[in-house]
Structures are given as C-alpha cells and as structure tokens.
Image: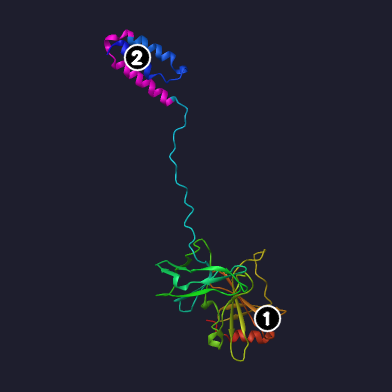
C-alpha cells in the first residue's frame, strides 16, 4: 500500500470526527507518515484505530441502559375473602375462622374451594367467596377446618391476606359453658361493620349469655377500663363491671392479652351477687 493510499485511508477514517478534535493529531500523523514511508502502513493504521477509539470514548452520548424489571412488591392477595379471627377448640384439632366483616356487605361463600395447608410450623387457611350487598351485615361467614393433629405452636396464617394480623383465641380461654348446660347458637358481629365477634349461649331456665371476643385496642392511656371489683376463679382473674344495663365480666386471653372477652346477660335482669355466683359456678379450666 502506498503512502497516498494510507493517507486516504486515514482521511476517510476520521471523516466523522468533530473538527475540534481533529487538527492536532491529524497533522501529526500526516508528518509521521511522510517521515516513515518505509515503515509501511501498519503503524499509521494502528494510530488511526487509537484515535477513533479515543473519539468513541470521548463522546458525551449516554450509554444505553438495559431496562430492569420492576421491583417485586410481594405476592398479591389471592381471590376470595380474608378472615379476621380464628377460634381453636379445646382439643386443638378444629379451627373455626371468621371472614372479615364489611359495612353493608355479606359474604357469599364457596366452601368447596376453601383451602387448608398444614406444615411443621404453620397452618394456612383460605376462604373462598365474594362480598355482596345485603341488608344484614352482622351475619358471620365462617368455616371450621379439621386438622390431622393438634395445632400446637404452629402459626395460623390467612392464605388470602398474608400480611394481615388475625386474632386467635382458644376455647380454653373461655369457661366451659356446655358443662354448665348452655348450648351455643349462631354467632354474629356486634354491630354493622363491627369486628367484635358475639357468641350466644342459651340453656333451659336461663339465663341466656352473650360472650364478646375482640382483638384488644388499648385506651388512649394504655389501660383498660377499671373494674368495680374482681374475682379469682380457678386461677383466672375476672373483672366485674356494674353497668346500667346489668353487670358484665371481662378477662384476657392467655396469649399475652391480645384478645379481650366480655360476658353479660342481655335479656334478663341479674343482680350483682347473683351474677358473681353464676360466674363462680362456671367451669373455668
């Protein structure tokens, strides 16, 4: 290849280089080519490549960035309805879960599509169904799951709402009302959209009882309402309140006071001493 051909190759190679970057190296290379005609075109071609590479590095155009996948926000809640509370029977092998109440809504259930998954450290329960408009939103939608073995220390999880904090209580937290002749009726929510579970018990000759279970929400000062007096029954502290509508009893669940229970007699006037005697006669285990 002749010197003229090398120079022509160089001129075409730097044709797209901005003028501001071209004069000094362009002139120097021309002089170097003329001085080293015998050296051939290899050295000049190498310089061309260096300059072109340097120009490419000096460009201010931003480098292309490959799109990154959006950050995961965790698994989305599945179809169906979440449950609010779970009640464990005394044997620990049956769990009843109660769907979350909604103002002006009832739950249309599809029990065949419910799901139960039991592992060594967790029990996941899922309720299928949908919320529909209704006139009585105090109705409770529930499902009782039968377990192959006792709950033990397993964590109870709502498969439809994995980030929820459902409250859990055991029948062992309650007096054994069936032993006293009471039969349990259908539960309900205390009021429209109210998340307080109301359990009702009746027996021949009365009185009928209403037992409320609610996840504890502390008062502004962090304390519960002060009782008028307390009873100690078989290791249980029972707070007794002398209210206008009749006396009521209150106590805590056994697991770090997360659930508060209230027991009253809604349909019959009961005196204070009679109410205390009834509480003492119950089977508190």
Look at 40% across and 14% down and name the residue there. 26
- Position of the N terminus, as image quadrant, is top left
Q: Which residues are magenta?
A: 34-57
Residue 142 located left or right of residue 148: right
Does 53 appear above or below 123?
A: above
Residue 219 located left or right of residue 257: right
Give the Cα separation between the discs numbered 2 and 1: 108 Å
- Mark closer to the chain start, 2 or 1: 2
Instruction: Say whether marks 2 and 1 touch (CB < 8 Å).
Output: no
Does 59 appear above or below 238?
A: above
Label 2 sits on residue: 8
Q: Is residue 99 shown in magenta? A: no
Q: Which mark is residue 247?
A: 1
Mark closer to the observer (2, 1): 2
Residue 148 position in % (x across, y down)? 39, 75
Look at 68% across and 81% down and name the residue there. 247
Residue 251 position in % (x across, y down)? 60, 75
Q: Which mark is residue 62?
A: none
Viewer-side residue, 205 vs 243 = 205
Look at 45% across and 19% down and name the residue there. 18
* SS for callout 2: helix
* SS for callout 1: strand
Residue 226 position in % (x across, y down)? 68, 72
Does 81 appear above or below 177?
A: above
Q: Residues within 10 Å of mark 2 (few under 14, many from 20)?
A: few
- The prevailing secondary structure element of the residues shown in magenta is helix
């Amino acid at each position: 290849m002749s010197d003229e051909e090398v120079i022509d190759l160089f001129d075409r190679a730097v044709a797209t280089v901005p003028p501001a970057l071209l004069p000094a190296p362009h002139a120097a290379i021309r002089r170097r080519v003329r001085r080293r005609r015998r050296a051939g075109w290899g050295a000049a071609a190498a310089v061309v490549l260096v300059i072109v590479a340097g120009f490419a590095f000096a460009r201010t155009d931003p480098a292309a960035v490959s799109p990154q996948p959006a950050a995961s926000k965790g698994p989305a809640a599945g179809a169906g309805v979440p449950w609010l509370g779970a009640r464990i029977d005394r044997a620990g092998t049956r769990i009843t879960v109660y769907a979350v109440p909604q103002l002006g809504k009832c739950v249309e259930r599809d029990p065949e599509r419910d799901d139960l998954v039991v592992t060594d450290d967790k029990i996941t329960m899922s309720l299928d169904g949908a919320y529909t408009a209704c006139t009585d939103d105090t109705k409770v939608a529930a499902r009782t799951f039968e377990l192959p073995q006792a709950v033990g220390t397993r964590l109870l999880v709502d498969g439809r709402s994995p980030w929820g904090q459902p409250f859990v209580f055991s029948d062992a937290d309650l007096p054994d009302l069936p032993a006293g002749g009471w039969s349990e009726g259908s539960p309900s929510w205390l009021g429209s959209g109210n998340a307080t579970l109301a359990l009702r018990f009746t027996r021949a000759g009365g009185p009928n009882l209403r037992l409320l279970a609610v996840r504890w929400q502390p008062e502004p000062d962090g304390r519960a309402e002060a009782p008028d007096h307390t009873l100690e029954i078989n290791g249980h502290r029972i707070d007794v309140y002398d209210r206008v509508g009749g006396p009521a009893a209150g106590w805590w669940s056994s697991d770090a006071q997360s659930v508060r229970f209230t027991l009253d007699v809604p349909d019959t006037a009961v005196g204070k001493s009679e109410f205390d005697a009834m509480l003492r006669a119950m089977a508190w285990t």
